[in-house]
Image: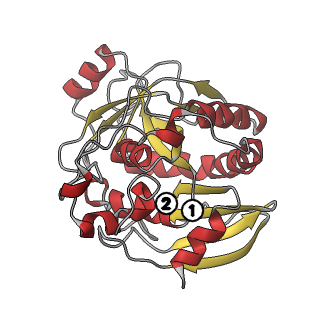
Amino acid sequence: MNFDLIREVSMAEKIVGVIGGSGLYEMEGLEGIQSVSLKTPFGDPSDSFITGHLDGLKIVFLPRHGKGHRIAPSFLNYRANIYGMKKLGADWIIGVNAVGSMKESIHPGHMVIPDQLIDRTVARPSTFFSEGIVGHVSFADPFCPVLGQVLYEAGKEAGATVQKNGTYLCMEGPQFSTRAESNLYRSWGVDIIGMTNLPEAKLAREAEICYATIAFATDYDCWHHEAADVSIGDVLRILAQSAKTAKATIRRAVQMLPDQRTCVCSRALEHALITDRTLIPEKTIKHLEPIIGKYIRSD
């Protein structure tokens, strides 16, 4: 498949990426479904991308952990996943996540649209800028506020109990928290805990893609004295119940997005690339063309 053509075509239409469970693309109304496999300078993405049109708008889905949930959070190729989304023209990415609730008021089954992140990961490449190029993007507000507001409104319309804003703590995993860790994180005032939003959010910002998350609480981690400690069985049960709500939210959200992006995400690299152009290897410039091409062109 001609990916240069894909990018050229995508510039003329609004394209929304969705990263989440492998069943999300089984959505009522999705037409013209195709599977697109691609390689990136950072290796293979989690799986093939699934493209289609939903109510006339192009959607690109990616099963975050691969079909059948084969890849643990620490070993996901986040750079390849986000690079692939950029290559396929996505200017918006909706992440769908299972999280633990760190607040009594956020019950299992509730939806949270977080606006802040705390990074507790230790083993994940989280930047495209290495191999002779340095970039420093602003990350004070890690989620796109425009997309976050759209997801909040769409979630309410879909009938979800939804909290707007909150702090998502991203832990390394794959084990769940110890009780001491869970209580420590609660003392920090975090709202939810998960394992996958970083470095997705960081890389999306570097790629100038608007990124926000639909987070479904599946449990109370292990801090709650009355609720049972988190188990994977509970997580899967709540996720299955939440899948319909997630699909309904996404279907509404994609129609509510503005035609033009004016948020900081769309120009995150404008003043972020600080390496002398003459010192950046041409190979690096070529590899990063989908991301830095409008600022730095290869010779």
Q: Are the residues flagged by discs 2 and 1 in contact, CB closer than 8 Å?
A: yes
Please identify the quadrant where the C terminus is shown.
bottom left
Q: Position of residue 287 (x, y in %)?
A: 33, 68
Q: Answer above or below: position of 121 versus 4.
A: above
Where residue 86 is drawn, which disc sits there? 2
The residue under the point 43% across, 24% down is: 191
| Residue located at (55% from left, 50% from top) | 93
Which element carries disc 1, helix, strand or loop? loop
The answer to whether 182 is drawn above or below residue 41 in the figure is above
Residue 236 drawn at (x, y percent)? 48, 52
Residue identified by numbered label 1: 89
Viewer-nearest residue: 54 or 155: 54
Q: Is residue 249 left or right of residue 208?
A: right
In the visual, does 196 lie left or right of 11? left
Which residue type carries mark 1?
Gly
| Residue that lies at the very extreme toward the bottom in this rendered image | 1
